[in-house]
Amino acid sequence: MGLRIVVTADAAAIEYKDAVAAELEKSEYVDSVTDLGLHAGEDVDYPHLAVKGARMIKAGEADRGVFLCGTGMGVAISANKVPGIRASTAHDSFSVERLVLSNNAQVLCLGQRVIGVELAKRLAREFVSYTFDPQSHSAAKVEAIESYETGEPEQA
Ligand SMILES: O=C[C@H](O)[C@H](O)COP(=O)(O)O
């Protein structure tokens, strides 16, 4: 079964969000792409969009997200406010690989004002091709991240 992807972007990144969504629709790893907007003419600030998308993942309504803004940083910071969500900006292939394989991140964040559209499409395509291995040496570290969300850190 393929991934259910949610995409969203503020007014600074609508063009790239649409390009990334179209790219992901073609991916063999993707079953569905849900577009939370923005669409042309709409204006909602990035924190609200990123948290809405992150909450969809947290609720089990989507598996992964690709969130965009001018830099990819505001949506990442915002998505990480949702407990259980791991999101980061990553603008190179190696980082995107490690975002999944090391960090088990559900959300890739991209910046329309920083990279070219072809790179954005490629990174989104690569992001959905990786699967975290819960038996890997990285799993305990991801669990440690989660332990800091419970209010009872395993090791401070
Ligand atoms: O991280 C924030 C984004 O880049 C956003 O698209 C632009 O935010 P700003 O208008 O506050 O610079």
Image (spheres, rainbow, N blue to C red):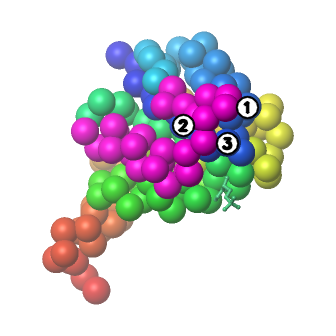
N-term-proximal mark, 1 vs 2: 2
Residue 117 lies, in percent from the top left, at 79, 34
Disc 3 target residue: 11
In the image, what residue occupies the spot 36% across and 52% down? Answer: 85
User: Alpha carbon of mark 3 to alpha carbon of mark 1: how far?
Assistant: 9 Å
Q: Is mark 3 within 8 Å of ligand 1?
A: yes
Disc 2 target residue: 8
Which amino acid type corresponds to the residue marked 2 in the rendered image? Thr
Q: Tag 1: Cα neighbours inside 10 Å, few (<14), some, or many (≥20)?
A: some
In the image, what residue occupies the spot 26% across and 34% down? Answer: 60
**Ligand 1 shown in quarter:** bottom right
Residue 74 lies, in percent from the top left, at 58, 59
Disc 1 target residue: 15
Q: Tag 3: Cα neighbours inside 10 Å, few (<14), some, or many (≥20)?
A: some
Range of magenta residues? 35-59
Q: Nearer the viewer, residue 130 or 66?
A: 66
User: Alpha carbon of mark 2 to alpha carbon of mark 3: how far?
Assistant: 10 Å
User: Can you tell which quarter of the image residue 153 is in?
Assistant: bottom left
Label 1–label 2 contact, CB within 8 A: no
